[in-house]
Amino acid sequence: MMVPCTPLRREVITYFAPCDPRQGMGGGARVEQMLTAFERLGLHITVVSYDGSGDLGLTHGIVSRRTKIVQLGLPARVPKILKSVAIPILVLIGLAHTGKNPWVITHSPGLASGLIGLLVSQFRRGHLIVDLTDARDRDTPQAVYELVLRSASVVFAVSHRLERLAQSFGARTVVYLPTFLDMSRYFRDNRERETTRTSLGLAQNNTVIGYFGSFARIEGLPTLLEAFSIVSKAEPDAKLLIVGSRNVEGADDIERIIRDRHIGGSVLLLPPQAYVEIPKMLRAADLLVAPKIQAPENEVADPIKIYEYLASGTPCILSSIAEVAAMAGKAEAAFIVEPGDTKALSQMILHVLANPELAHAYAARGRRLIENSYNIERASNLIRRTLADHVGPKPIVEGDRVVA
């Protein structure tokens, strides 16, 4: 005798992101952490993503057991004006994957995610939730940026400056939600550390200085390369590990600077790695550096890279810019230098390398800081409370049909 199947009841949301959460670059790390937090709330998620430098076409993939991704790709050679055709296509994709009265999450108020999320949420009469991670980009009109923020049921802001900015534009509910991490990924394993170093061709006597992330101008990589050219003369066994790429227009030409400074033999340049691999690569370094320069974007943002550095338990040197650097400096959890100061950075690197006990004490405090105050459990609880208070019950899907 056959028993009728009970339709599967799932709580489903749609998440619009201008990046691939599996990569970690271009905001992908924040998206990945937000997805993990929403999964902990019992939600199933469809990510609708856009890649403006990929292959032409629509791809489907799996991010995790609860999250799938639909990504529209357009080649980089397509003129920017023609890429605007992606907006109505992404809206149609979003509508196809979104039921009635949904929760629609968007990574930012920008054109590639915020405007699309706004249109889909209005068509479906749902709730728009914005994760405000950065200042307005050049491609997004000010009117669109403000409209998305005003239209959201909830805006999560990664920094207090962005919190105040959203409030000034008339956003209804703005909640401070800084970067957070799943600390179970950031464990110390000396055997794995040595395996990773060996796989990278690093010797036991090499002191490894690490940088992870974009080659965008605001990241200050030329300052680090200049400083390292000084450090390498005093520390000939030092190696500079750079993991990242020129993922935005106007990025620094790192390969040219390496050639000009004649430090190619001491620099290991790797392309972006899958986000799941980043924690073990961080552990392979002896010192991590975030040399951000003075720029408006850096003053309002909350770079996840710095939290990852601190969580790894590796000594860190940070530029004195952004809220997280001030917090880490006050807690004596990281060494702080003035942005763009090559001499100060080189001297600090040499100081940290010459004082391993002090460096390890700072690193231990950095890890505890993230464990205690910026963990995913704390963030998930804040998200749950906020959405319960300001959005209401989670949307339920029965089979493929929304019922609540």
Image (cartoon, grey):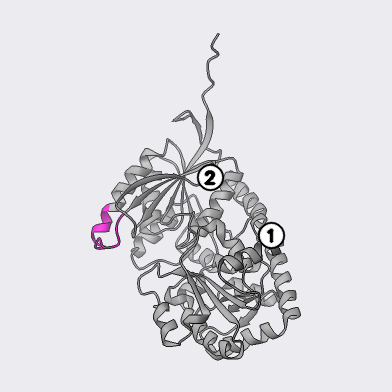
275 up-or-down from 396: above or below: below
Crowding around mark 1 (Cα neighbors within 10 Å: few <14, some 14 to 19, many 20+) is few
Q: Is residue 258 left or right of residue 81?
A: right
Q: Earlier in the sequence, mark 1 or mark 2?
A: 2
**Residue in the image at 39% along x and 81% along y:** 256
**Residue in the image at 65% along x and 65% along y:** 193
- Which secondary structure type mostly characterizes the magenta part of the structure? loop
Q: Nearer the viewer, residue 372 or 188?
A: 188
**Residue in the image at 65% along x and 68% along y:** 310
In the rendered structure, which amino acid carries the disc numbered 2?
A: Ser
Q: CA distance from mark 1 to mark 2?
A: 21 Å
Q: Any magenta on residue 174?
A: no
Residue identified by numbered label 2: 64
Find residue 194 and report its horizontal and vertical position in percent.
65, 66
Q: Any magenta on residue 84?
A: yes
What mark, if any, has residue 187 been given in the picture?
1
In the rendered structure, which amino acid carries the disc numbered 1?
A: Phe
- Residue 137 found in image quarter: bottom left
328 up-or-down from 401: above or below: below
Q: Is residue 20 left or right of residue 249?
A: right
- For the record, the magenta segment spans 74-85
